[in-house]
Image (cartoon, grey):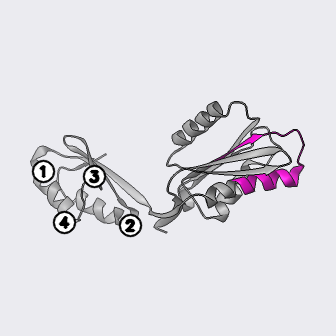
Amino acid sequence: MDKFLTIKTASQGEYKERKSSFLAFAYPVSDAEQVKDLVANLKKEYYDARHHCYAWRIGVENQAQYRTFDDREPAHSAGDMIFSAIESNNLTNILIVVVRYFGGIKLGASNLAKAYKTSAQEAINNAEIIEKTIEAQIRFSFDYSLMAKVNKFLKDNNLNKENYTFVSGNEILLTFPQDFYNNYLAQLQAIYGINLL
């Protein structure tokens, strides 16, 4: 599996049930620190809401990580339902937060679960779903005397400025489709004096 589905940009959805409002916010994310910041920002912005429930998934297959959070709602009634919407759309690298404003009427377990899943699905429906290639990275340093060999490696593999960043004068971070990892690693290891970091 060298590709995955995610959303292109942030999107929103909304669902109302018996005077309770469920505002859903979906974001493309790449790490848990980003998730933490986005959740904190929503809690600050919607400070008067009773619940800020969420689910996220990052990565694919064996490397996939995910988390759900019910924020004082009955266990498995919120975060798991949001995650269910993520799973049923086969998405990853996504965070969905549902902010609930309580309307004064208890919904019951099944209606509550439905409200969280439906609002999350609305945010997904309003997003542009895109396919992305799974990427890998190699970081290496080299002596300046090897610059010609490094440039030849980059040119021979059609690697351009979208694929590499000079972290410092003689240190490069390569980003490329995962399928090429073993090939690029072997080529770099064959250049005497390259230090893989």
Q: Nearer the viewer, mark 4 or mark 1?
A: 4
- Give amino acid for label 2: Asp
**Residue drawn at 39 percent across, 62 percent down:** 178
**Residue drawn at 88 percent across, 48 percent down:** 107
- Give amino acid for label 1: Leu
Residue that badge 1 annotates: 146
Quarter of the image where one finds residue 102: top right
Instruction: Find the distance from the CA under tag 3 to the CA under tag 1.
Output: 17 Å
Left or right: residue 80 versus residue 31 is right
**Residue drawn at 58 percent across, 34 percent down:** 41
- Give amino acid for label 3: Tyr
Residue 197 coordinates in the image, percent (x, y): 31, 45
- Give amino acid for label 4: Asp
Q: Which mark is residue 179?
A: 2
Q: Which mark is residue 156?
A: 4
Is disc 4 surrounded by few (<14), some (14 to 19) or many (20+) residues within 10 Å? few
Q: Earlier in the sequence, mark 1 or mark 2?
A: 1
Residue 188 coordinates in the image, percent (x, y): 24, 57
Q: Which mark is residue 164?
A: 3
User: Where 176 sits versus 43, above or below?
Assistant: below
Q: Nearer the viewer, mark 3 or mark 2?
A: 3
**Residue drawn at 24 percent across, 58 percent down:** 160
Left or right: residue 132 versus residue 21 is left
- Element under disc 1: helix
Quarter of the image where one finds residue 185: bottom left
Is disc 1 surrounded by few (<14), some (14 to 19) or many (20+) residues within 10 Å? some
